[in-house]
Amino acid sequence: MAAHRRRLRVLLRKPCGLGQGDGAASAFQLIKYYGEGSDPQVRRITRPVTGSVRVAVGGVELVSGWQVGELGQVIFDTPPADGAIISAGFAFDVPVRFEQDSLDVGGETYAAGDVASVPLVEVRE
């Protein structure tokens, strides 16, 4: 099967907690939680959309003093204070591939087709 790779873009509407400052750590991985309660599923975000990441420390958004590093880490110029809650909102891409090598396309009208379904499979990193 041919590996036709694409991206699926996801917008995170609610900020996610990335961790808590300890006064020494300056890098925090972007993550997204799925589910609620005491045992949510956690996805490590490695492909944030450039320019979409917004970071807050202690509930206050920071417009400078940080950058997004390789593979989705938020890196602070100065480590957040001990006990400070770090959170971020962002859009991210999910690598996907087509599940099948071919698609059934109907010819509804001239120069317009109809595709009933385009099955995709996430490519795990």
Image (cartoon, rainbow, N blue to C red):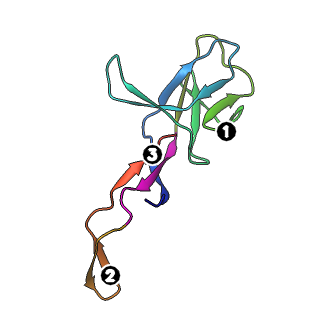
- Disc 3: which residue: 11
Q: Residue at x 36, y 67 (%)?
A: 102
Residue 18 against residue 24 in the figure, above or below: below
Write down the quadrant of residue 83 in the picture.
Answer: top right
The amino acid at mark 2 is: Ala
Q: Residue 119 location, x and y as percent?
A: 33, 57
Q: Residue 72 location, x and y as percent?
A: 60, 37
Residue 58 against residue 113 in the figure, above or below: above
Q: Nearer the viewer, residue 39 or 89?
A: 39
Q: Residue 49 location, x and y as percent?
A: 56, 48
- Disc 1: which residue: 70
- The local secondary structure at tag 3 comes to strand
Segment tinted magenta in the rendering: 90-101
Quote the CA–CA distance across marks 2 and 1: 41 Å
- Disc 2: which residue: 112
Q: Residue at x 74, y 22 (%)?
A: 78
The amino acid at mark 3 is: Leu
Q: Residue at x 27, y 82 (%)?
A: 107
Q: Nearer the viewer, residue 106 or 38?
A: 106
Q: In the image as oriented, which residue stretches furthest toward the right? A: 77
